[in-house]
Amino acid sequence: MGTESEPYVQLATLRQVHQVVAELNTARSLADTLQAVTDGVVKGLGFELAAVNLVRQDGDLVVAAVSGSAAAETLLAGRVGSRASWDRRLHMAQHWGMLRFIPHTEGWVLDGDDVPTWHAEGPPPRFADEWHPDDRLYAPMYASPAGGGELIGVISVDKPVNGRHPGPWACEALQMYAFQAAIAISNARLRANMQRALVRLEREQQALRASEESFRQAFEYAPSGMAIAEMGGDQHGRVVRANDALCRLLGRPAAIMRRYSFSDLVHPEDVGVLLRTSAEGGRAELRLSRRDGSYLWVSLRNSVVADTTDGPRFLLTHVEDIEERKSRELALAHRASHDSLTGLPNSAELRARLSGKLCDRPHHNGAALHADSYSYGYGPEESAAPLVGYDHHTHTIAPEGDAVAGKGLAVLFCDLDGFKSINDRFGHHTGDAVLIEVARRLTSVVRDGDTVARLGGDEFVVLADGLARDDAADLADRLRNAIIPPIRVEGRAVRVGASFGIGWAGCGMTAEQVLKSADQRMYLEKRSRSGNRNHRRAG
């Protein structure tokens, strides 16, 4: 598979991981959560068989869930492996990041080893990274993402669907999934404890004080952030109580926390998300403000605390730090949508942004439907069609013929002049430096909200909304003038020029049609400029 398609494959895998992680968080009980963990490995991570070995109170590990094979489930489910055997296996295994791998050649069966294991017959590997039935891959689950703290359990996987050892991307996905599974299992245990405490509060009025103390300890000493907030009334959302873990997470003392509601702490862009989750079972991923002014990504989950007389009184909010996972997701998404050399939006992102401005029906404007600035249009029958289903859409319309008739979405197609000779003469290293500097100069000229994208090679595209025709021509001149000054690379000065074609986007056009129109006009300008130079030389 080519390197150009790799980010999209990774993004598709990331979406699968997101889906199975979401299913982890919807499980209602610990048993459902454990089964969801193994189901997620099979459904989303490319393995045919998975088992969760859960640490019991006595320290040994029991096979608590199996997915992918009914025969394996019959053989393994409920079997117990001693902690000593598990420790030996994890210690002798190869370290693949946080994962542990034991190849079939290592003779992993030890005296006294009682780890429940699924055995399958198979031929010797035919190539270096082919999976052997006796290969073993484990994903330990710890109480902290760095692999420290208490061992919660171990996910064991077998039979990759492609028959090969997982590569770096698959290992990273399995490692990230194991971290999320550990959180889900810890949360399921915590929720079970909290739910039992709440049931006792409702059913055992005689034991109210004991139940409150149990709740207090579970709340105060929970390893993750928790808060109790008012529910309903003028004080809805105001924090009544916050545990030490939440105070440390946000860098705010408990006394200060009681001055705020969650709406005061949430990032302005996430207020709507918060409001949609202020209910039983509501959950969201959003950013909360820390004392130093920074924002932290958290996973927030609500449970209702009800009074037997007055009904729902408080929201019990569970807050988990997901900053590391979010940073990885955002970085992966950025790499998938941006050019690795210049950092500009790439071709796919450009087309997505352009398509987001367009609907598939042109705007009705008199007898004709103007789809671009020159000749794109539709016949009388299509012109009369009503814009059903697009009442919510602000139509993109190209300006009319004169310079002040209106404003629209200008698409400036830029092709560098003389760039090939720089590559040929000085090498691709110099060419790359030129592209990076051109990208910087283009970005410095446009307005906030405009898009500068690298289409590929030495081609760039600028999307600038709200421009009249004269504005677009002026912008093209300023962009060209910004590119012309010499570019210094390793002590030498090189120059490139630029040809611009100005097209106009209009509803009824596709992104490809818009870009093709601008590209054609760029080539008209390039030929015109070349012809003028040849004419001057002949004269």
Image: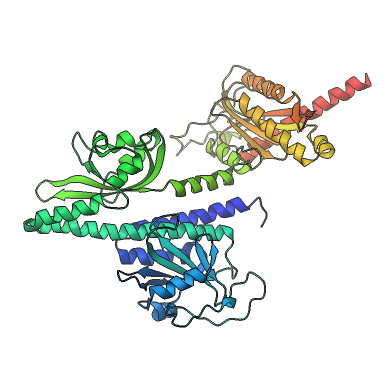
Q: How many marks?
A: 0
Horizontal placement of 362 versus 79: left or right? right
Q: Position of residue 375 (x, y in %)?
A: 67, 30
Residue 5's place in the image compared with 409, above or below, is: below
Q: Residue furthest right?
A: 538
Residue 39's place in the image compared with 369, above or below, is: below
In the rendered image, is residue 49 in sight? no
Residue 536's place in the image compared with 418, above or below, is: above
Q: Position of residue 212 (x, y in %)?
A: 15, 52
Picture residue at 28% right of the left edge, 57% below the top:
190
Q: Quadrant of residue 64?
A: bottom left
Quadrant where the N terminus is found in the figure:
bottom right
Picture residue at 23% right of the left edge, 56% below the top:
194
**In the image shown, does 385 or 433 lie closer to the viewer?**
433
Q: Residue furthest top?
A: 404
**In the image shown, does 368 or 162 lie closer to the viewer?**
162
Q: Position of residue 378 (x, y in %)?
A: 61, 35
Horizontal placement of 427 versus 112: left or right? right
Picture residue at 64% right of the left edge, 43% below the top:
340
Horizontal placement of 26 versus 88: left or right? left
Q: How is the image coloured?
A: rainbow
Picture residue at 12% right of the left edge, 56% below the top:
210
In the rendered image, is residue 223 in sight? yes
Q: Position of residue 161 (x, y in %)?
A: 55, 69
Quadrant where the C terminus is found in the figure:
top right
Horizontal placement of 317 versus 154: left or right? left
